[in-house]
Amino acid sequence: MPQTIAFTKGQGTGNDFILLPDPDGELDLSDAQVAALCDRRFGIGADGILRVVRTPAILDGHQAAADGAEWFMDYRNADGSPAEMCGNGIRVYVRYLLETGLAELPVDGSLLIGTRAGVKRVSRPDEHLEVDLGEWRTEEDEVLVRAKGLPVARPGLSVDVGNPHVVVALSGPDELDGLDLAVQPILDPAPRDGANIEFVVPSDPLVHHGVGSIRLRVFERGVGETLSCGTGVAAAALAVRHWAGAAAPDRWTVDVPGGTLSVRMVDGRVLLSGPASLVFSGQVALA
C-alpha cells in the first residue's frame, strides 16, 4: 500500500515548492519520487521540494546543528538532485516554520537555518523576510553561453552565492523576451556541477534615487526556466554592480516574471528580501 504523506505548497515570486514536514528525518525520497511529486501534470507541481527536518536528523545538518541552527532546509530540485541553497525557498521555508508554530521570529530578531551552503540567517525587517546569503565570489574566467534565440554566444560572469550562477548581459528587452528557455542553454566550458543561468537587462535609467534596477529571466539547473530564482536575483545584481564599477549602488530591485525582489550588499555580504507565502496543504500518496 502506498505511503501517504502530508505536504504544503508554497511560493516566493512564483518560484514554487512542496514542503514536506519530516522533523525526525524518517522520509527518504528517491530522485524519481521527487520528480513525480514536482510533475506539473501528474503530481502536485513545483520547482523543487523543501524537506523540513531538524538538523540532528540529517547527515548534511550536523555542522548546521553545531552552528546553532535547529532546522535544516533539505532542498531538492524538480529532477530530484540536491541543491546547495535556494533564496526564495528559504523564505518560504521560514514562512512555513512560523505559520505552523515550529519557530518564532520577532521583528527585531533572526532565525538560523541550516543549508548545504552553510547556516543562513533570516530576519524580518518589514513585511517581507530577508535572508543573509553571506559572502559571494566572482570568477574571472569567462564562460560562453549559447541560448536559443541568441544569434551568437555571449560571455557570462560566474558568481557564487552559495550555489553557482552564470550571468549574461543582453542588449535590451527584445533580446530577453525573444529567448526560448524551453531549450537548455549551453555553457562553455561546462561547470562540473552545472550552474543556474541568468539573462539580464538594465532598466532605463539603471540607477534611480540611489537604487539600481534590472530585469531578468533564469534557467535553473535541474528544473528549467522558472518564474524566479532568489540566489539568481542576487547573483545578477552582483554581476551588474561589478560591471557598472565603483560608483554602482549597494541596493537593487530586480524584476522577474513572478514579481520583484530586493537585494542589498552590506560589509561584503549580500542579502535578499521579498514575498513568501503558503498556498495550500494536503496529503499525497507516494508512488
Image: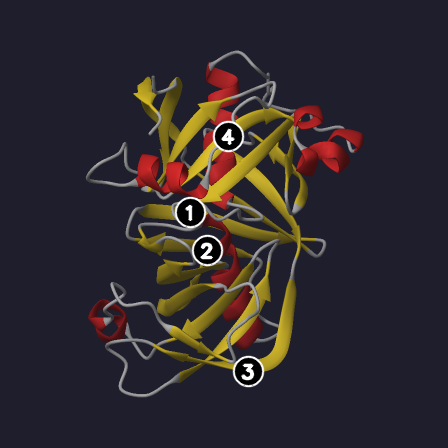
Q: Is residue 111 left or right of residue 20?
A: right
Q: Secondary structure at mark 4?
A: strand
In contact (CB < 8 Å): disc 4 and disc 2: no
* Residue 179, placed above or below residue 54: below
Q: Is residue 106 left or right of residue 176?
A: right
Location of residue 115 in the rendering, given as x and y in whole percent from the top left corner: 62, 40
Q: Secondary structure at mark 2?
A: helix
Q: CA distance from mark 2 to mark 1?
A: 8 Å
Q: Which residue is mark 3?
A: 142
Q: CA distance from mark 3 to mark 1?
A: 27 Å
Local crowd size for mark 2, using a 10 Å CA cut-off: few (<14), some (14–19), many (≥20): many
Q: Which label belongs to residue 126?
A: none
In front of the other: label 4 or label 1? 4
User: Which of disc 1 and disc 4 is earlier in sequence?
Assistant: 4
In contact (CB < 8 Å): disc 2 and disc 1: yes
User: Which of disc 1 and disc 2 is earlier in sequence?
Assistant: 2
* Residue 138, placed above or below residue 261: below
Q: CA distance from mark 4 to mark 3?
A: 35 Å
Instruction: Kindly indicate the quadrant of the structure image that contains residue 110.
Output: top right
Residue 52 vs residue 274, the one in the foreground: 52
User: Which of disc 2 and disc 4 is earlier in sequence?
Assistant: 4
Which amino acid does the dot numbered 1 rest on? Leu
Location of residue 152 in the rendering, given as x and y in whole percent from the top left corner: 32, 88
Which amino acid does the dot numbered 4 rest on? Arg
Q: Which residue is mark 2?
A: 233
Residue depicted at 32% across the width and 76% down the height: 147
